[in-house]
Image (cartoon, rainbow, N blue to C red):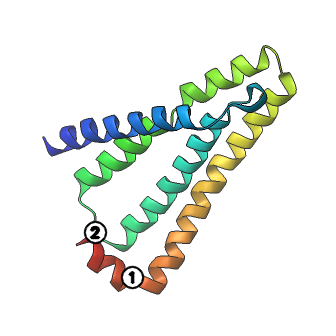
Amino acid sequence: MMQFISLWIGGMIGGLLRYALSLWIPTPFDFPLGILVINLSGSFILGAFYQLAEVIEIKSWFRLGFATGVIGAYTTFSTFDLGVEQLALHHLVKSLSYAVVSLIGGPMFSYIGEKMMDFVSGKCKQTIKELVQ
């Protein structure tokens, strides 16, 4: 039951965060900057979270609620697809550059988040355990 509750709450939080940021981040020259920032930051956060989960014990319901709920609702592939398609209608080069940056940047930011957390946890493993528990 706790898994369902954590997914529900996490999904609400992630969806609201995505919506709020999409209103706040500008769209210069019809470029879907908000979607790009959301997807790259979500990749970074997810990579850092999974590395943290390897260092400290995180309850499975919380891991599910945060990774699948919050980050899953925060980032979304369908929004990315729609952004590429709508941009391609009028700006093919911008659309292709957006797609390439997203597809390369997403895994890269996830890796950077993981390595950053690996570094931080190696330096501050005990402090992180004390803060989370």
Q: Is residue 113 left or right of residue 124?
A: right
Q: Quadrant of the C terminus?
A: bottom left
Q: In the displayed structure, would residue 48 be above or below residue 68?
A: below
Left or right of 21? Residue 89 is right
36 sits to left or right of 97: left
Q: Position of residue 35 (x, y in %)?
A: 60, 35
Q: Residues within 10 Å of mark 2 (few under 14, many from 20)?
A: few
Q: Secondary structure at mark 1?
A: helix
Residue at 33 percent of width and 36 percent of height: 11
Of the pair 31 and 105, the residue shown nearer to us: 31
Q: CA distance from mark 1 to mark 2?
A: 12 Å
Check disc 1: other Cα within 10 Å, few if <14, some if 14-19, many if 20+.
some
Q: Label 2: which residue?
A: 57
Q: What kind of residue is marked 1?
A: Lys
N-terminal of the pair, mark 1 or mark 2, is: 2
Amino acid type at circle 2 is Glu
Question: In screen coordinates, is 37 left or right of 19?
Answer: right
Residue 4 x %, y %: 20, 37
Query: What percent of the width, then of the height, locates residue 54?
Result: 39, 68
Task: Tell me the residue that label 1 is attached to.
Answer: 125
User: Closer to us: mark 1 or mark 2?
Assistant: 1
Q: Is residue 94 above or below residue 45?
A: above
Q: Quadrant of the N terminus?
A: top left
Taking the spot 49% from the left edge, 62% from the top edge, the residue there is 48
User: For the point 56% across and 42% down, which residue is it?
Assistant: 38
Residue occupying the point 34% across, 85% down? 126
The quarter holding residue 90 reads top right
Label 2's element?
Answer: loop
| Residue 127, position as x, y percentages in the image | 35, 83
- The furthest residue to the left: 1
Looking at the rendered structure, the number of numbered marks drawn on it comes to: 2
Instruction: Say which mark, if any, is on residue 115.
Output: none
